[in-house]
Image (spheres, rainbow, N blue to C red):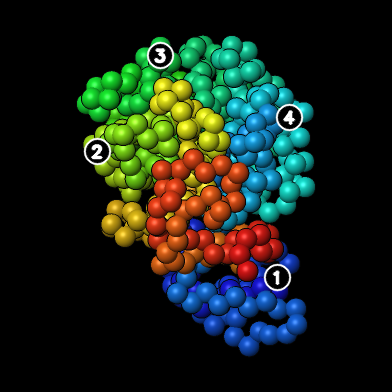
Amino acid sequence: MLVVRGGRVLDPSRGFDGQADVVIERGRIERIGRGAGDGIRGEAVRVIDASGHWVVPGFVDLHAHFREPGQEYKEDIASGLRAAAAGGFTAVCAMPNTKPINDTRAITEMMMARARNAGGSRLYPIAAATVGSDGKQLTEMSDLREAGAIGVSDDGRCVMNAAVMRRALEYARTFDLFFSQHCEDHHLTAGAQMHEGEISTRLGLAGWPSAAEDVIVARDLILAELTGARYHVAHISSLGAVRLVREAKSRGLPITAEVTPHHLALTHEALLGYNTACKVNPPLRTEADRAALRDALRDGTIDCIATDHAPHSQLEKDCEFEAASPGMIGLETTVPVLLELVREGALSPLRLIETLSTRPARIAGVEGGALKVGAAADVTVIDPELDWTVEPSSLCSRSANSPWLNQPVRGRTVLTVVNGEIVFGS
Ligand SMILES: [Zn+2]
């Protein structure tokens, strides 16, 4: 038995924000409420003092890259799941752009088996929508679903052919998979290094215009309406895409969208000085885009936050800007980066937790996202005031490609519980 006592419990699934104890037994939440843990003691009872801390449903990440199979020197499933637990994520969806690409039942099953052996946070594969993610031939989605995939995506690449995209959405709908699209018109972004704008001009780097994201979102929303599929915009980054999603949602379409912590926190100005840690895809955009993303997250146009955790070794980042691989790690810096938004008044604590747990759990159709009696005991405890420095030695991820590296930050996950078992912290 585990008792998490005296914390500030935030449960967006029932709009609860108040002091309460959480009593966990046999992997489930047994009791919850003020004083619910009073008088519980004994040899088999572990009491955690959570006073001054937030006690929230475990986070669910819809978008992470674990690099296994194929690039385990950057991250593998075990190290990725450790990083997830350290960041407060009790479940992570792993994108299929591994080497080889996860486009078959065998690879999905292998990933599930590795995750089971590693233990800790749960892994849910998102399998490829097309064979080799080359945008031509659809994968065997019924097999992939049976093997454990919960969604499909060609992430890293966009499905460019509208006819293939239409059929992919129809298939995904048939097999009850959500479709997460990396929205990028590759013809418009050929050679692009960063957002197309005044900073790219100043730096002399080829630009990735917002329009390349917007045109795909516009096309896909039309196809989503045609097919009735569960369409999801991955890492939305532009003001134009936000407007399109808002309009489609106002007509009741079952579409959803995620945004990354870095697109909420940073703009293309972070690229001044050619900092390869800030080279991401889609790129960091303008202040107007960032403001639109924050507004959309607040009003529900954007449903949730996903990390796009993309580990790379020094080899891929300590090089010329144009040669550097896009992406940054995110699992372990999400809490301090987003608490900064709460401190700035851009987001309420309850909405923040909803976007990290309740909403993404529902989009993926997986367990979690609630602190209710009888629910699986996936619980994260955060110390919102803890000051720490992001250093390679302080991270569980195998990679350290982060713009927050060697920076002081405030707020950290101190305890993560999955199915009633402590998987991070003490
Ligand atoms: Zn992507």
Q: Is mark 3 within 8 Å of ligand 1?
A: no
Q: Considering the numbered disc 2 on the image, is that residue within a helix, a strand or a loop?
A: helix
Is 269 displayed left or right of 54 in the figure? left
Q: Name the residue under label 2.
A: 287
Q: Name the residue under label 3.
A: 190
**N-terminal of the two: label 3 or label 1?**
1
Q: Considering the numbered disc 1 on the image, is that residue within a helix, a strand or a loop?
A: strand
- Which mark lies nearer to you, 4 or 1? 4
Distance of label 3 from label 1 (alpha carbons): 54 Å
Seen from the viewer's position, the closer of residues 325 and 164 is 325
Q: Where is residue 11 in the image (x, y as percent from the top left)?
A: 48, 62
Distance of label 4 from label 1 (alpha carbons): 34 Å
To which quarter of the image does residue 302 belong?
Answer: top left
The quarter of the picture where the C terminus appears is bottom right
> Looking at the picture, which amino acid does disc 4 mark?
Ile
> Looking at the picture, which amino acid does disc 1 mark?
Glu
Q: Name the residue under label 4.
A: 107
